[in-house]
Image (cartoon, rainbow, N blue to C red):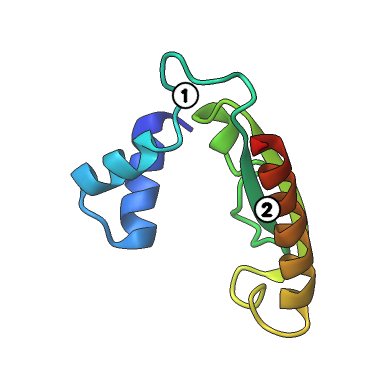
Amino acid sequence: MSADQVVRVLGADLALSEAAARQELERYLLLPGQAASYLHDLFRAREQPSEAPADPSMCWAEVAQRVEVHSVPGSHQNVVREPHVRELARQLERCLSAAQDSDR
């Protein structure tokens, strides 16, 4: 997926204008001088529709420097509901702790 395709997807998914979607995308791109350790954590629901990309990074690896995929139970619609949200919270807490530790 190209950066232009990601912009279109962001715009459709988030009801953003193309300019706003491109600005949002730029937050995820590697900028000159950024540290090589810059990491994006992606929480991907285990239940995926048949049309979902086979790429576990959902194509973010094509536009972001480093992507770590965390598989969480549930689908896109229910991953933030019980009982799935508990596992999502556990994994998110682990990622936040790791980020805090790396900032020290």
The reply, left or right, for residue 47 in relation to residue 76 is right
Going from N to C along the chain, the mark reached first, 2 or 1, is: 1
Name the image quarter holding residue 80.
bottom right
Quadrant location of the C terminus? top right
Q: Amino acid at mark 1?
A: Leu
Horizontal and vertical percent position of residue 74: 73, 71
Query: In the structure shown, which secondary structural element does the residue marked by tag 1 occupy?
Result: loop
Q: What residue is shown at x 73% (from left), y 42% (from top)?
A: 101
Q: Nearer the viewer, mark 2 or mark 1?
A: 2
- For disc 1, the marked residue is 30
Horizontal and vertical percent position of residue 49: 64, 62
The reply, left or right, for residue 5 in relation to residue 20 is right
Horizontal and vertical percent position of residue 20: 23, 47
Image: 42 above or below 104: below
Image: 53 above or below 83: above
Q: What residue is shown at x 35% (from left), y 60% (from top)?
A: 14
Q: What residue is shown at x 20% (from left), y 52% (from top)?
A: 17
Q: What residue is shown at x 67% (from left), y 44% (from top)?
A: 99
User: Quick check: can you spot residue 10?
Assistant: yes
State the residue in front, 96 or 91.
Answer: 96
The crowd level at tag 2 (other Cα within 10 Å; few <14, some 14-19, many 20+) is: few
User: Quick check: can you spot residue 56?
Assistant: no
Marks 2 and 1 close (CB-CB < 8 Å): no
State the residue in front, 90 or 46.
Answer: 90
Name the image quarter holding residue 102.
top right
Query: In the structure shown, which secondary structural element does the residue marked by tag 2 occupy?
Result: helix
- For disc 2, the marked residue is 96
Q: Residue furthest bottom?
A: 82
Q: Amino acid at mark 2?
A: Leu
Q: CA distance from mark 2 to mark 1?
A: 21 Å
Horizontal and vertical percent position of residue 11: 31, 52
